[in-house]
Amino acid sequence: MLTRHDKILLGLMVGIPLALDVILIWGPTVASIFFSFTNWDGIGGIEAKNIVGLKNYQFMFTGYTLFWPAFTHNVIWLLWLTFIATPLGMLFAVLLDREIRGARIYQSVFYLPVVLSLVVVGFIWELQYFPTDGFINNALGLVKSGHIIDWLGDSRINLYAILGAASWRHIGYIMILYLAGLKSVDPSLREAARVDGATEVQTFFNVVFPVMAPINVVIVVITAIESLRAFDIAFIINQGKNGLELLSILITNNSISEASLVGFGSAIAVVLLLISLVPIVTFLTRVMRTSQ
Amino acid sequence: MSAVAVAATPARSVRKRRRIRPARVALHAFLITMVVVWLFPLAWATYISLRPLSDTIQHGYVSLPSNGLSLVNYQSAWTQADLPYYYLNTLVVVIPGVALTLLLASMVAFCCTQFSWKFNLTVLMIFTAGNLLPAQVIIIPLYFIYLHTPIPNLGSIDIGNFSFALFSANNLLYDQYIGIILIHVVFQTGFATFVLSNYMKTITREITESALVDGANVLRIWWSVILPLCRPALAAMATLLFTFIYNDFFWALILISTGSKRPITSALNNLQGEFVANFNVITSAAILACLPPIIVYILLQKQFIAGLTLGSTKG
């Protein structure tokens, strides 16, 4: 049915975007893996003597003092979003998924931070967290009493301070996704549960939540990917130093912004890639299953 | 089944209104508290932006205004910090970025949903997975691609002191608008392809098939048959892509080195250094910078949310 001409056109319509995707995304992904086995500094070509095998990895895991802190911070980020922010977003969705007055307004307000860039989110929260001029310390009376908490400067707590700001944005995002899922649940299921005498809480956990399984997976995947991508807000606060190290920031700091350890930065990128593949593959197998 | 549910609804709500009123009150109290918590940081930032520097120096930031509020910081942000210029930088990236992303993504989605090819699923997975990778995984090689790919310099379009190079003023992708547009288009095409193909799956293939029988070529079918049917999805995606590209910080941070070429979101980071002693002006600039996405969100809320949920719930 398709003419030769049509087949060529279709080939181009897929081929051009695909070529761009392969050249600018998958090519660099593979190149990162290759770079990670070299000590290339970004200048000149890569020769046989630049190949250093697993040395970058060895140094990263044993000698480099920032790797494990950054890794831990990413894990804390993931755990925080998964067990605190995401459930809160789901709770908001469940509360708003009923006929209550003003549901629309509540929803709009909770979603508002999601349209802000993380740069602006960082600025806005700095005004809350500043040691003497910030709202929080003043509101708690800590400035007057002289017990100032340095929310963003103290490396023991600053990660949690920016997680608070990041959650402000993440919760609304999850809420919207979950709300859409809840709306797609067959109302007769809930009705049946109610007729059987189940409470709202029981209905949610025993009927709605299991039906929502595909969306729950998507939400967990999105949360995981967001945690691995975290970069902007930590960079805005202090370039990702002093308690705010993240894998993503170590990659650019080592290879582009501050030093030219291309090979070493790439090794960190490979670690980030390998971790990211877990949620990505989970997501893709999900998509495959539903489209077959 | 649904008729039963509909019939049961009025009775239920009457019963409910009588019985669990305290629960409703508690629910609203909780939600209103949360609304206050949610809006407070924004309201506080707005308050700071309206206070003159002299006032906050004298009384501290956490104080009542002694000489009233003023828009003087907004004025400084607008003129001294060159905000209009940065808005323009964003504009020349966002508009081609969104348009090209939708074009490319809709072509791929069209080909992969309206025809049965062996590799449909593989192609969709390549695009989707590519979009899910953290940008930092690919940034190092990408940075070198940008530094070493020759791009012709065919002059420029100049508006006042603003210059949009055709295609590259330094013969590279690095530090050029075109480079930043390119990476946005390629990265976001992954996401847009995923969403649009979910949408196009719901369009029956008979439409394409009968258009082919009528003698239309595939390019024509894509443009004048399928795209018009996808208008709601395209509108939703355009809204969402606008915000994504507008809010980008990372690509511009690494791939643009000239401060005056940075789009507004990443330019804010430099302002922080420039106006370090005047947080009032920085805050005003930040508020001005986040207004366009907020306005888009308020005006096009429905499209906005549709775009997000199209991507997740059908996947």
Image (cartoon, rainbow, N blue to C red):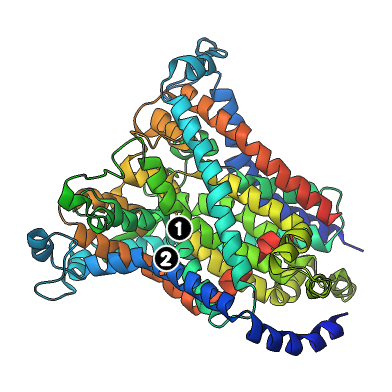
Q: Which residue is mark 2?
A: B38
* Camera-nearest residue between B4 and B300: B4
Q: Quadrant of residue B44?
A: bottom left
On the image, the x and y values in percent for residue B190 come to 64, 52
| Contact between labelled residues 1 and 2, with CB atoms less than 8 Å apart | yes
* Camera-nearest residue between B59 and A121: B59
Residue B118 left/right relative to A103: right
Tag 1: amino acid: Trp
Label 1: few (<14), some (14–19) or many (≥20) C-alpha neighbours in 10 Å = many
Q: Which residue is mark 1?
A: A168
On the image, the x and y values in percent for residue B104 come to 64, 59
- Quadrant containing the C terminus of chain B in the rendered view: bottom right
Label 2: few (<14), some (14–19) or many (≥20) C-alpha neighbours in 10 Å = some
Tag 2: amino acid: Trp
Q: Is residue A174 visible?
A: no
Chain ID at mark 1: A
- Quadrant containing the N terminus of chain B in the rendered view: bottom right
